[in-house]
Amino acid sequence: MLDLDGTLFDHRGASRAAVADWVASAGLVPTPALQDAWHDAEERHHRAWRDGLVSHEEHRRRRLREFLPLLGRPVGDDAALDAEFRDGYLARYRAHWVGFDDVEDALAAVAAAGLRVALLTNGVPEQQHAKLDALGLTGRVGPVLTAGELGLAKPRPEVFLAACAAVDADPARTLHVGDDHPVDVVGARAAGLRAVHLDRHGEGPLDEEHRMTSLRELAGFLR
C-alpha cells in the first residue's frame, strides 16, 4: 500500500515552485520565508481537515486568509478565496506536477515480488486521480483509496483498516510505504500493518529501523 504525495508525487517541489510563481506574479520576490509560510499554513490547516474539523474547501480558505496579507492582497469572501486558490495557486501547482524518478524501480520490485499494490492518500479523489493521470500511473497503482471517499484520513487506524477491507487484504500481511512518519508509519502500525518510512529529505526520525531514503530500496523490505 503506497502513499501518493511525497512518495510517488513530488508535492513539496510542485508546491514551492507554484508559490514562487504566484508570488512573482504579485510583483514580489519569492523568498524562502514566503514559501515556508505557505507550507506551514498548509500543514496546520490540512491537519484540521484530516481531523474532520473543517471541510476541504475551508482548509484552503484558511491557508489563504493567512497568506494573502503577506502578499499585500485583500482577503475577500469565500467565493473570492475559492477563485484565488483556483486561479492563483492551484493552476500553478498543476503546472509543476512531476513524479519521482525512483517510482518505476519501486513498481518493478513490487511486480517481481508478486504482490498486489494499492494506493492510500489523504486527498480528494478528483485531484489525486488527476495527479496519477499526469504521472502516467493511472491503472498501475490501483485501487486508489482517498480520504475524501473513505470519510477518514491517515493517521487514524480506522482508515488503514477500511483500505485493507476495500481491497480484501489482511492488515498483518500488508506493507504501507509513506513519507510522513507520524501519519503513514505510526498510523499504519497502530492498525496492525507493517510500515516503512520513506525519508527522502533526511528529516528523521533517524532511529527508525524500517527507513529508506529512496524507493529504490523498497525491494529489500519485500522479502
Image (cartoon, grey):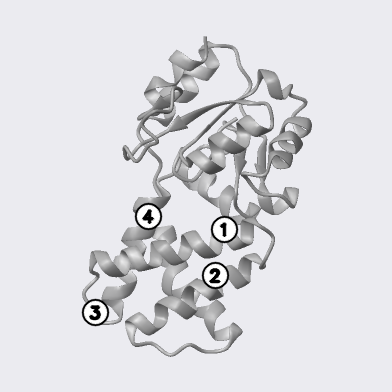
Q: Nearer the viewer, mark 2 or mark 1?
A: 1
Q: Which residue is mark 2?
A: 60
Q: Is residue 138 above or below residue 69?
A: above
Left or right of 4? Residue 155 is: right
> Mark 2 touching mark 1, by CB under 8 A?
no
Which of disc 1 and disc 2 is earlier in sequence?
1
Which of disc 3 and disc 4 is earlier in sequence?
4
Q: Is residue 118 above or below residue 30?
A: above
Residue placed at 51% from the left, 12% from the top? Answer: 112
Residue placed at 57% from the left, 50% from the top? Answer: 128
User: What x and y, as percent, mark residue 214?
Assistant: 36, 29
- The amino acid type found where label 4 is placed reads Ala
Q: Which mark is residue 14?
A: 4
User: What x and y, as percent, mark residue 117?
Assistant: 61, 26
- The amino acid type found where label 1 is placed reads Arg
Q: Which mark is residue 28?
A: 3
Q: The residue tagged with tag 2: helix, strand or loop?
A: helix
